[in-house]
Image (spheres, rainbow, N blue to C red):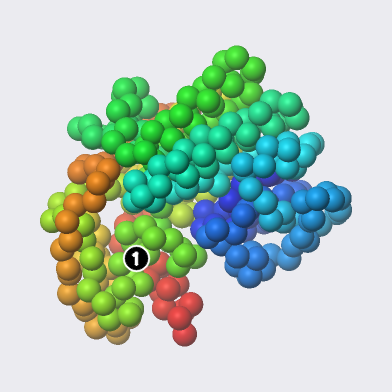
Amino acid sequence: MKWLITGGCGFIGLSLVKNLLADTNNKIIILDNLTVGTKHDLAQICKFEEIDPQNIKYSDSLVQFVQGDILDADLVKKLSKDVEIIVHLAANTGVAPSVDNPRMDCENNVIGTFNVLEAARTQNVLRVVFASSGAPIGEVSPPIHEELAPHPVSPYGASKLAGEGYCSAYYRTFGVDTVVLRFGNVYGPGSAHKSSVVAKFIKRAMDAKPLEIYGDGSQTRDFIYIDDLIKAINKAARVSGVGGEIFQIATNKETTVSEISMLIIDSLKENNILPVGIELSPFRLGDVQRNFSDTSKAKKLLGWRAETSLKTGINLTVRDFINEKI
């Protein structure tokens, strides 16, 4: 199939590209503004041809890269020509940046998603897979499931909810086959650029800095290993009859931030890195206290479930960070 991956140079995007290239029948176009990832990161994964966004010419290369922005509606439309699947990963990610700059968050996550859906509509793309999160639901008693009424706490949650709403509208009004995946807290090898809790804890520990926890560490999240997530994206792109659906993509397990910090410290000890202390900071605006997902719908309709244990995933991630630093 021919794929367009927005944000394809980020952590999840690179992992997806690597996975798709295991089948040489796949052709991939990557659109990324390189806010987070780099062309060097992409080159570590595969050979690619760079396309001039002002003079788009396609070739037989399996991977083609365009440096551009999802806010450029004309560019997104041009790149969607003859594409069968769009995986829309490009976004402002995280609560803190959305609190610092809510307008930027809105423009990227709402207008950018609108541009992708318009491109899919006008170019007859077979399916759009939209990367969302648990943030649209907000502060509720978990587990989160797809039928809960959303009450976002942060601007990030609001912008992702708007994206979900547009996916629903484009499916029901225009017949654009959309599938929304609400990712848990994704971690794994290749996440050195991320500012998420697992990546940040490992980087600080390796720099002999204390692990910084916002609040008292009792807040919970649902941590999902990258390989499991990529399998879910593949399922969402290929399984028939799931257009217009939303799926929680996580592990159905609740883990406190304190627990994840201890798992990381234990794994670092096993790799001969001395333990570090923990530093408590005030709670952050927009953060929810408890968050984990009921993934039974994904199991039933997609035939998917997470398979990697948290301990195994953390050990693999720590070793990758260590190898990258050597």
Please name the residue shown 48% across and 77% down the image: 324
Viewer-side residue, 31 vs 103: 103
> Which amino acid, mark 1?
Lys
How many labels sit on residues? 1
Residue 183, quarter of picture = top left
Name the residue at the top extreme: 173
- Report if residue 312 is visible in the image: no
- Residue sitting at 69 percent across and 56 percent down? 67
Most foreground residue, 323 or 114: 114
**Residue position for label 1:** 200
Q: Is residue 31 left or right of residue 195?
A: right
Q: Position of residue 36 (x, y in %)?
A: 53, 60
User: In this image, 53 relative to 153: left or right?
Assistant: right
State the quadrant of the N terminus. Answer: top right
Q: Position of residue 320 (x, y in %)?
A: 45, 72
User: Against 200, is 117 above or below?
Assistant: above
- Horizontal side of residue 230 vs 184, given as left or right: right
Kindly state the secondary structure of the residue where label 1 is placed.
helix
* Image position of 49 with respect to 88: above or below: below
